[in-house]
Image (cartoon, grey):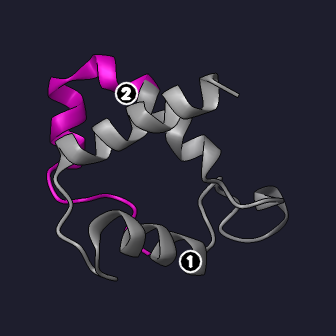
Amino acid sequence: MNLWPPRFARYLVTHPRDVPVVIAAAWALRRTGWWRRTPFLPVPDDAYWQFRLATFGGSPTPQLDPREVVEAAKWSRRQRSTR
């Protein structure tokens, strides 16, 4: 499971204000009961992550731009705050 698009870490280092937004979005995608199964990290289930990649990028292996990922995370935050 590749959770990081190429150049994403570098983008976050140069845009530190986006880090909390990305962390919040990642936390919202975490697998239920993540602490009970290896790798004991709050990451999404593989099948769910593949689905999200396909719906976001239009293919199972999209070329994601870091700016697009951050914009999607900001959109997700706005959607969660309107509930």
Q: Mark 1 or 2 closer to N-term? A: 2
Quickly name the residue at label 2.
Answer: 19
Whether 9 is among the magenta residues is: yes
Say which quadrant the C terminus sits in: top right
Q: Residue at x 63, y 24 (%)?
A: 82
Q: Which residues are magenta?
A: 1-20
Which residue is located at x 14 percent, y 51 percent?
Answer: 7
**In the displayed image of the protein, which residue is found farthest to the top?**
17
> Would residue 56 be counted in the magenta stretch?
no
Residue contact at pointers 1 and 2, CB within 8 angstroms: no
Picture quarter with the N terminus: bottom left
What element does badge 1 sit on? helix
The foreground one among 23 and 69 is 69
Residue under the point 40% across and 69% down: 55
Q: Position of residue 78 (x, y in %)?
A: 50, 26
Label 1 is placed on what type of residue?
Asp
Above/below status of 27 relative to 17: below
Q: Which residue is mark 1?
A: 46
Residue 4: image x %, image y %? 32, 58
Image side of residue 40 versus residue 36, left or right: left
Q: Main secondary structure of the magenta part?
A: helix
Residue drawn at point x = 78 percent, y = 70 percent: 37
- Given the image, on which type of amino acid does mark 2 rest? Val
Q: Quadrant of residue 41?
A: bottom right
Work out whether residue 9 or residue 53 is closer to the camera in this orientation and state it.
Answer: 53
